[in-house]
Image (cartoon, rainbow, N blue to C red):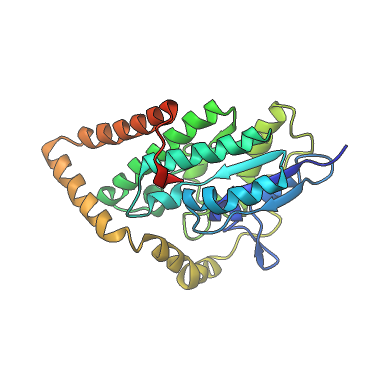
């Protein structure tokens, strides 16, 4: 019996940032690949740090389909929320196309909803809430489309792991080795319940000792801060405007309007997919 072919799509989370082994990033997807069957899966990681849904749809998806995988993971969307031109309709359209294309070839689909970056970074409430609202919108779309396409969906946006500092790297946006192992373990459990994962579950315990505080701070100062800055540069002016709007609504007691507006946008995006009304510029 041949080993399954597993292809991973997404951004830095799936690339493995935070789990450095032998001078390279490993990450949850590679850990999972080693545990899918008695023999390691034939694994290809196409995820790229900084990728948005557009990058996955236009660049990673065609390469994945050429490999004709048995299993495809698609974990992406956080970088979209960190951009000025965030558009939940476009995000939904792209994810729908990616999910449909993968499952249309017969691949099993893996997806996940994720914590919002503002909370993970510990931003002040007025700055964190707009980002949280965006991430909730992405997660709602991922939930709905995962159900539509029968994905093995991991609810990773909440729970004790999001607040356990031992799970996270110094930048507070990416899991450390222990966190990546937790993701691999939980995905393995979902696939084992379907009879897909037949290998031994990944170990939750790290292979290496946790980085020292000094090493973590050095990485954050030399690389991590730059990573965050590069992804937020075009968002910052708008985020300050969103924060000001947030504070005005809170002062007036009308914050619920912002939530209702975001919810209406998600509903409209999903309704458009159901009716076949996809934006041509969202490909």
Q: Residue extending furthest left? A: 252
Location of residue 22 (image quadrant): bottom right
Q: Is residue 147 left or right of residue 133?
A: right
Q: Is residue 211 visible?
A: yes
Percent position of residue 57, x then y: 53, 47
Q: At x 49% / y 58%, what residue is drawn?
A: 50
Relative to 81, residue 71 above or below: above
Q: At x 14% / y 35%, what residue is drawn?
A: 253
Percent position of residue 85, x then y: 33, 52
Percent position of residue 8, x then y: 64, 48
Camera-side residue of 166 and 83: 83
Q: Can residue 166 be seen in this view?
A: no
Location of residue 59 (image quadrant): bottom right
Q: Is residue 261 left or right of residue 2?
A: left
Q: At x 37% / y 41%, what residue is drawn?
A: 88
Q: How many labels does the image show?
A: 0
- Position of the N terminus, as image quadrant, is top right
Q: Residue extending furthest front? A: 280
Q: In this view, does 281 lie to the left or right of 203?
A: left
Relative to 181, residue 1 above or below: above
């Amino acid at each position: 019996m041949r080993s399954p072919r597993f292809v991973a799509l997404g951004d830095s989370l799936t690339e493995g940032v935070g789990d450095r082994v032998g001078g390279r990033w490993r990450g949850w997807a590679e850990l999972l690949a080693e545990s899918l069957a008695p023999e390691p899966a034939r694994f290809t990681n196409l995820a790229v740090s900084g990728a948005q849904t557009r990058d996955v749809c236009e660049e990673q998806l065609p390469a994945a389909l050429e490999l004709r995988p048995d299993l495809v993971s698609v974990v992406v969307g956080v970088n979209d929320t960190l951009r000025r031109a965030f558009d939940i309709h476009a995000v939904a359209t792209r994810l729908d196309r990616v999910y449909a294309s993968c499952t249309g070839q017969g691949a099993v689909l893996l997806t996940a909803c994720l914590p919002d970056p503002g909370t993970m970074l510990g931003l002040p409430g007025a700055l964190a809430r707009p980002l949280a609202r965006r991430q909730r919108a992405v997660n709602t779309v991922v939930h709905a489309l995962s159900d539509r396409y029968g994905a093995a969906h991991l609810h990773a946006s909440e729970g004790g792991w999001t607040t356990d500092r031992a799970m996270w790297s110094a930048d507070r946006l990416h899991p450390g080795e222990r966190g990546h192992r937790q993701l691999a373990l939980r995905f393995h459990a979902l696939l084992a319940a379907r009879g897909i994962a037949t290998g031994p579950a990944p170990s939750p315990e790290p292979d290496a000792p946790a980085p020292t505080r000094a090493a973590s701070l050095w990485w954050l100062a030399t690389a991590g801060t730059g990573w965050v800055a590069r992804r937020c540069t075009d968002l910052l002016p708008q985020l300050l405007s969103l924060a000001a709007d947030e504070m005005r609504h809170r002062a007036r007691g009308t914050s619920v309007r912002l939530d209702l507006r975001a919810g209406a946008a998600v509903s409209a995006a999903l309704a458009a997919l159901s009716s076949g009304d996809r934006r041509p510029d969202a490909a």
